[in-house]
Image (cartoon, grey):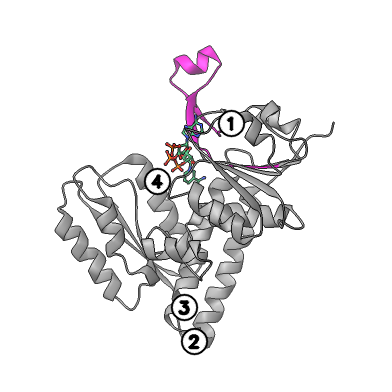
Amino acid sequence: MTQARIIDGRAEAERLRAEVALEVASLKAEHGLTPGLAVVLVGDDPASQVYVRSKGEQTLAAGMLSVTHRLPGHVGQDELLALVQSLNADPAIHGILVQLPLPSGLDEKAIILAIDPDKDVDGLHVVNAGRLSQGLPALVPCTPLGCMILLNRTLPSLAGLHAVVVGRSVLVGRPVAQLLLQADCTVTIAHSRTRNLPEICRQADILVAAVGRPLMIQGDWIKPGATVIDVGINRVPFRDPVKAAEGKTKLVGDVAYKAALEVAGAITPVPNGVGPMTVACLLANTVTAAKRIHGL
Ligand code: NDP
């Protein structure tokens, strides 16, 4: 049995960022339009700080305007809402992203609902979720968009394939299932109450794992030749007792990768699979938003 093809998310993300940069250059040259992305970071969560810095750097590298607003963790709901409203009204800003999770005490749903849906580059506003579910043009959450790009680059056609999505979150599971449906897949959505999960996964031509449980999906849950998209990002201690004793950790996905390699037709690794696509798709969404706002 040959090993699965490893889907190189880092290379795909690089390609997408280059495409975005080209489009930004032509928007500037032909329309005098520079897409602008505002990122709002509340509090001092270290992981969020890393993500926000990387988003800012990549936005600038693509030739776009990047603005980062850093607010203290004790900021009030009204102050945060006022900032979102000022960004909604700012003509230089076409994309607004409020980095989640927000510190406790802030009403995340209310903040997301306050974002102008036309600038909601995270695709989390109910207007965008509703548009997506009706097959209308929408700003689509970045990670699901990244999964679809990887699938389209891997498979000649998605139509008629059985896609099983494990996970039903608003951020990943639900939107990726909607996108797979739009691509004419037959879609099953599984979750924590699903019975016979291994059996259901074994029916999948496309298996998307978005659970957040390290290595949960076993090799024998995978149909031979299936395409596996592992969205999970889980930090676990090293098995090596020396490294573990030093408190060192590593990233693993939701799929038992080594076993899956022997069965799947193609698979995304963790890291360097879906992860890098997320920020690249954020840049792409900002360009999409800028063009729509300007009727281009
Ligand atoms: P959530 O915790 O919001 O959702 C997890 C989903 O998995 C839920 O729908 C839950 O079901 C389901 N689930 C939990 N346990 C089981 C189980 N034993 N069997 C079947 N289903 C189960 O997570 P997210 O969707 O936000 O993220 C999922 C993973 O993807 C995480 O590891 C996260 O870090 C990663 N991620 C990666 C990104 C990237 O850029 N690559 C971006 C975003 C997330 P139920 O609804 O019934 O509770």
Please tell me the numbered disc located at residue 251: none
Spatial CA distance of label 4 from label 2 is 33 Å
Q: Is residue 204 left or right of residue 79?
A: right
- Please tell me whether mark 3 sits on a helix, a strand or a loop: helix
Q: Quadrant of the N terminus?
A: top right
Q: Vertical placement of 163 versus 232: above or below?
A: below
Taking the spot 31% from the left edge, 58% from the top edge, the residue there is 112
Circle 4 packing at 10 Å, graded few (<14), some (14-19), many (20+), is few
Per the image, the residue denoted by label 2 is 31
Taking the spot 50% from the left edge, 47% from the top edge, the residue there is 173
User: Contact (CB < 8 A) between labels 4 and 3?
Assistant: no
Per the image, the residue denoted by label 3 is 292
Q: Which residues are magenta?
A: 227-255
Q: Nearer the viewer, residue 265 or 207?
A: 207
Disc 1 residue lies near ligand 1 with CB under 8 A: yes
Going from N to C along the chain, the mark reached first, 1 or 2, is 2
Circle 1 packing at 10 Å, graded few (<14), some (14-19), many (20+), is some
Q: Position of residue 256 (x, y in %)?
A: 62, 28
- Please tell me whether mark 2 sits on a helix, a strand or a loop: helix
Going from N to C along the chain, the mark reached first, 1 or 4, is 4
User: Contact (CB < 8 A) between labels 1 and 3?
Assistant: no
Please tell me the numbered disc located at residue 50: 4
Asked if residue 246 lies in the magenta stretch, the reply is yes
Q: Give residue 20's quadrant in the image.
A: bottom right
Q: Position of residue 140 (x, y in %)?
A: 49, 61
Type of the residue with mark 1 = Leu
- Please tell me whether mark 4 sits on a helix, a strand or a loop: helix
Per the image, the residue denoted by label 1 is 197
Q: Position of residue 170 (x, y in %)?
A: 43, 50
Spatial CA distance of label 1 from label 4 is 35 Å
